[in-house]
Image (spheres, grey):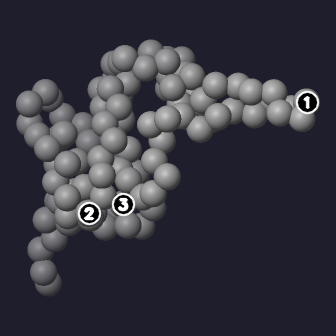
Amino acid sequence: MKEVSKLDLLIELLKAGQVPLLVGPAGIGKTAIVYEIGGKLNMPVIEIPLQLTEPEDFLGLPQIIDGQTKFTRPDWFPISPAIIFLDEFNRANPRILGSLLK
């Protein structure tokens, strides 16, 4: 049986629609792995430092259109396939985590 590398396993998870969570101490290469995966999949990586964000950065800003509130797409949100890398998840404000779950 062929041994599968951790990098290949992460790529297969992404292709299957799963969202891997990389956990470990600072400086072990988590960010580098994300960029390596982006390169292998030929997809841009959009890195978002969660400790510097607000809920509106994910929900978009509200607009009233035809009497209904609609939220605009955030400027950073990709139109074509991309890897959205939510960095420093453990340092995010609880309000941010709540908006990500919506």
Q: Position of residue 24 (x, y in %)?
A: 18, 34
Which label belongs to residue 42?
Answer: 2
Q: Residue at x 8, y 36 (%)?
A: 28
Q: Is residue 69 left or right of residue 78?
A: right
Does residue 38 lie above or below 1 as drawn? above
Does residue 100 lie above or below 40 as drawn? above
The kind of secondary structure element at disc 2 is loop
Q: In which quarter of the image is residue 89?
A: top left
- The one of 56 and 34 positioned closer to us in this rendering: 56
Q: Earlier in the sequence, mark 1 or mark 2?
A: 2
Q: In the displayed image of the protein, which residue is found farthest to the right?
A: 67
Q: In which quarter of the image is residue 55?
A: top right
- The one of 95 and 23 positioned closer to us in this rendering: 95
Are the residues at dot 1 and dot 2 in contact (C-beta closer than 8 Å)? Answer: no
Q: Which numbered mark, 1 or 3, is in the foreground of this view?
A: 1
Q: Residue at x 20, y 64 (%)?
A: 40
The amino acid type, in three-letter code, at marker 1 is Gly
Q: Can residue 10 be seen in this view?
A: no
Q: Earlier in the sequence, mark 1 or mark 3?
A: 3
Q: Is residue 3 left or right of residue 48?
A: left
Determine crowd level at label 2: few under 14, some 14-19, many 20+ residues with C-alpha closer than 10 A: few
Determine crowd level at label 1: few under 14, some 14-19, many 20+ residues with C-alpha closer than 10 A: few
- Residue at the spot of label 1: 67
Q: Earlier in the sequence, mark 3 or mark 2?
A: 3
Q: Is residue 27 visible?
A: yes
Which label belongs to residue 14?
Answer: 3
Q: In this view, does 80 lie to the left or right of 29?
A: right
The amino acid type, in three-letter code, at marker 3 is Leu
